[in-house]
Image: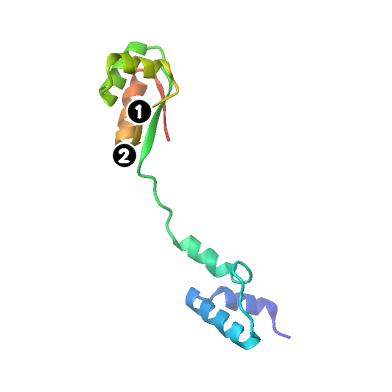
Amino acid sequence: MADIEKLVNELSELTLLEAAELKTALEEKWGVTAATGGAMMMPTAAVAAAEPEEEQTEFDLVLSEIGPKKINVIKVVRALTNLGLREAKEAVEGAPTTLLEAVGKEAAEEAKGKLEEEGAKVEIK
């Protein structure tokens, strides 16, 4: 009987190409077809780990709380969104409100900083 631990170690060192060749050879030898997700999970997990995660590039800026300086927050909201006075006031008073959608990270961070200077609580999602 084969040394199981030695066999496991050798199989763990296979590259994806070698594992695919092994799969084909075993299918031919045994006259079967390997089902996806069964014994071949190791190579699929390695492929998934090799793919880099897509980095988020668009962010939403959400005003959570107005804070003590409501008028100053309204002014900042008007400057950031180009809303009229009435619309900006309604947006601020309706908190939590999404002020900016699908903006870059730097723009979202800059807007968050301006609003937090006036005492507002802001989230970037």
Residue 95 makes an appearance in the image: yes
Mark 1 closeness class: few <14, some 14–19, many ≥20 residues within 10 Å:
some
| Residue 76 sits above or below residue 49 on the image | above
Residue at the image position 31 percent from the left and 14 percent from the top: 86
Residue at the image position 35 percent from the left and 14 percent from the top: 89
Mark 2 closeness class: few <14, some 14–19, many ≥20 residues within 10 Å:
few
Image quadrant in which you'd find residue 41: bottom right
Q: Position of residue 108 (x, y in %)?
A: 33, 33
Q: Position of residue 23 (x, y in %)?
A: 57, 79
- Earlier along the polypeptide chain: callout 1 or callout 2? 2
83 displayed left or right of 39: left
Q: Amino acid at mark 1?
A: Lys
Q: Amino acid at mark 2?
A: Gly
- Mark linked to residue 104: 2
85 displayed left or right of 125: left
Q: Position of residue 78 (x, y in %)?
A: 28, 20
Residue at the image position 65 percent from the left and 85 percent from the top: 30
Image quadrant in which you'd find residue 97: top left
In the image shown, does 82 or 111 lie closer to the viewer? Answer: 82
- Label 1 sits on residue: 112
* Gap in angstroms between the C-alphas marked 1 and 2: 12 Å
Residue 119 makes an appearance in the image: no
11 displayed left or right of 68: right
Disc 1 on helix, strand or loop? helix
In the image shown, does 20 or 33 lie closer to the viewer? Answer: 33
